[in-house]
Image (cartoon, rainbow, N blue to C red):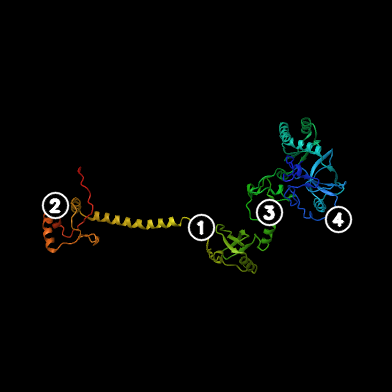
Amino acid sequence: MSCGCKTSGDSAHSCGPKKTANGCENVNTCGNSYKLSVFDWLSNINNPAPNRCDFVEVRFKNDRKSFYKNVNNIPLHIGSVITVESSPGHDVGVVSLTGELVKIQMKKKKFSEESALKIYRQANQKDLEVWQEARKKEDGVKLEARKIAQRIGLEMKVTDVEYQGDSSKITFYYTADNRIDFRQLIKDYAGAFRTKIDMKQIGFRQEAAKVGGIGSCGRELCCSTWLTDFRSVNTNVARYQQLSINPQKLAGQCGKLKCCLNYELDSYLDALSHFPSSSTTLDTEKGRAFCIKIDVFKKKMWFAYVDNSIAWYDFDIDLVKKLISKNKKGEKILPLEDLKQPETPSQSIDLIQENNVDRFEKKNRNNRNRNNQNKPNNNQNQGQEQRQGQGQPQGQKKNRSERQERPNRPEKSENPNTNSENQPRQPKPQQQQQQKAPVDNVKAEANPDADKAQQGNPHKKKFKKKYPPKKDKNA
């Protein structure tokens, strides 16, 4: 049996043995079972018999609700499927609210007790089967109805289709900008669907409430979940909240201004009551200044000169009130740039370092800095070597190339950078004199030109390398 629990009245849901005379066990009274349901906070309280309320709120497809009178005193609970009076025939719905709260809802929606229809009985198996078969046809009927309206050339949109519980009537909900002539349309619908036709025009907001969807905030639409009425929203609401008049951002799924713009309007109006008027002007020694912007959260107002509106100066509202009082006395205030006080930026310490984006890159950054510090030293050394090479005359360059071709000398005492540990043990003075003589003779025989160059340049420095380059045979 279909009771509509947890499925917004969907007939495809079946409770099976869980459905009893007391209602469905899956239906809660917390307001989560139905769309636009009412929280029954008196569900656990037993009312005395003489003061018992005879009216029941019954819910049909989507957000359509109505109130019916329980003339036969049938024991009804939230989730009970009942058969109610309709014109023509009867309809099938689900009980959504019982008890004393029904009178409060009737008073809120201005529903008269005299116009309330009566409840026939609890729905039997035959009523439920006919109702479920009718609900299965609705999608196909909606598509066929749109094709017929398009063939006739009517500027309208069929939003939803609802069958009555006994399949004796079809209600078409449509939206249109202009008035529609239904004479030909109703004839075509009656010939195609072979039943009574009822046309109801709804607004764009009611269409969004019936269809449903996800808003820009990421939640379900308010009109399809909990809003029971639609209040007017105009552009002044956005201006009070300092929002840019952008239709793409301020419009909802229905194409109209969002209903949520009214939620915070009272808070903004309360905050703006402490601000001076936005049309305030200040008489300064440099000229007249006007208010160009207001920040509700920071409690500041921006002013600019009439002649030069590019430069803006922000002041607290307390200071602005003092400046306005001076102007009322006939005194001109100082220029805006003199009144502007330098702001002291408040430095916040983030102990956890959650707001630091580069908190994982500190190690790499330190390594880069170290490498950058070493790079200029290498460049300086290379520059010094180049300068020394450029400052030498051509004769010295030749001698240098000749010395590079010499074999390594056994003596390393002339190099001051060598460590004492790497140096070989020095022989005795007599052995040194004996060893120097043959080495000098070898030098003189191998490089006679180098001796002449040394005699010509006595102040020339001797350059030695540990690893001289190899000789190029092709040179």
Badge nearest the viewer, 3 or 4: 4
Question: Disc 2 residue type?
Answer: Asn
Is disc 3 surrounded by few (<14), some (14 to 19) or many (20+) residues within 10 Å? some
Is disc 2 surrounded by few (<14), some (14 to 19) or many (20+) residues within 10 Å? some
Label 3 to label 2: alpha-carbon separation: 100 Å
Placement of 425 over or under 234, stated as above or below: below
Badge nearest the viewer, 4 or 2: 4
Residue 165: tell me if it is visible: no
Question: Disc 1 residue type?
Answer: Asn
Label 4 to label 2: alpha-carbon separation: 132 Å
Residue corresponding to mark 3 = 237
Tag 2 secondary structure: loop
Compared across the picture, whether 305 is left or right of 407 comes to right
Q: Earlier in the sequence, mark 4 or mark 1?
A: 4
Badge nearest the viewer, 4 or 1: 4
Q: Earlier in the sequence, mark 3 or mark 2?
A: 3
Tag 4 secondary structure: loop
Quarter of the image with the N terminus in it: top right
Q: Name the quadrant containing residue 337.
A: bottom right
Tag 1 secondary structure: loop
Q: Earlier in the sequence, mark 3 or mark 1?
A: 3
Residue corresponding to mark 4 = 48
Residue corresponding to mark 1 = 356
Q: Quick one: 209 or 394, which is closer to the camera?
A: 209
Label 3 to label 1: alpha-carbon separation: 38 Å
x, y percent for residue 224: 71, 47
Tag 3 secondary structure: helix
